[in-house]
Amino acid sequence: MIEIQRPVASRAGQGFARPGGFPLLGLLLGMGILGWSCIGNRSTPSPGMRGPTVLPTSAPAAQPTASPTPSPTPAPRLWRLTDHACCTQPFWSPDGREVWVIDRPDPEEPAGIWGIPLSGGVPRRVMTRLGVFSPDFRRVAYPEAGQTVIEDLQTGERWIAPTGGRAVVFSPDGEWIAWEVSAGNAPSLERRVSTLWIARANGEEAHPVIRLIGGGFAGWFPDGEHVLVISREAPGGDPFLMVVHHPDGSFQRIAQGERLRGAQISPEGGWIAYQNLFAADPGQSGLWVVRKDGTGARRLPVFGAYRWRREGVLLVIPLEPGAPSHRVVEVDAASGAIRPLTDPVTLPFRIAGGDWALSPDGQRIVFVSAEDRHLWILELPSP
């Protein structure tokens, strides 16, 4: 049976300002916390979110018993998190225990990150420092006096990154940063030439990695040594995906298409999901997956918004124009098999403008409702 919960104590959003621009944050904020990289960083669940440890016990004497009945898969649950249309572009705390939003409840105070418990309740101020964060939120990069400052929020150390004030993307462990330097103005992205640079977070060991044409940086692999990029043979040519080993600059092409978009790396780095749009051959258009070594390329039998739920399993909200409700499915990358996770007949919901985020453990979605503009939580069935 579907359970819809609306916590009585849910008062998050009370006193929150309506969504608005924060001009002082500039491009770093808009591209950092709320989606600068097209790659969604997935944090390792905290110990408190892992399953309990089961200790072995002495085996009882054998007894004739009936065959066990498999436990039913828990039904998805949906509940409203906020009482007011307070926020857009929510994201998760690294441990998945809170939903975080950026807001300015008091116009006399600076904007900051606020945390909302999953049961609702009064939001708490997490921090006022805004910028581009490492996945564990230990380090943050922000512009200051025309330079890029890297700050360690635990130790208070600060370094000036050798980026010329450009925005950066942290590696999964927060120890490295990547940025691009364009060779000049280009009439379009397809003709832009840039160089990918990488350095340690403290600015040391800065070095150019690879020259890119009509593409750019697409994400870090979990090992911190490989990165995913998009490039072309020549301006205007078809783009391709490459895996680059940044310590020595070696690379391997793994996929090519007419209009590659939205590359996302799986949690353990074994798979990449991406879109190939408006191909001359309709059979090439759609949502694709490919292994890191270039094998196993597969066009999936569904298209829509997507995030990696766990290694080898992609969560998709299908694009179905005209449907009265959204739905959620998961797709096995190796086989293409689809498993429905919600039923729009028994659990209808609509996400506003693609504004949703998947929790670090892949068990919950937070989204802005198209019906009431509140934040809602959708808890998904377990694997």
Image (cartoon, grey):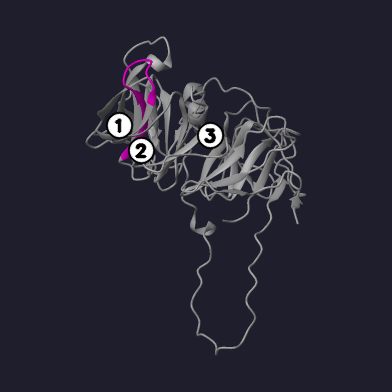
The range drawn in magenta is: 226-239
Image quadrant occupied by the N terminus: bottom right
Residue ID for mark 1: 198
Where 359 sits versus 356, above or below?
below
Q: How crowded is mark 3: few (under 14 residues within 10 Å), some or many (20 or more)?
A: some
Magenta-colored stretch includes residue 237: yes
Where 205 sits versus 163, above or below?
below
Mark 2 residue type: Glu
Magenta-colored stretch includes residue 233: yes
Residue ID for mark 3: 128
Q: Quadrant of residue 152?
A: top left
Q: Position of residue 25 (x, y in %)?
A: 51, 24
The reply to whether residue 219 is in sight is yes
- Earlier-in-chain disc, 3 versus 2: 3
Mark 1 residue type: Ile
Residue ID for mark 2: 157
Q: Is mark 1 on a helix, strand or loop?
A: strand
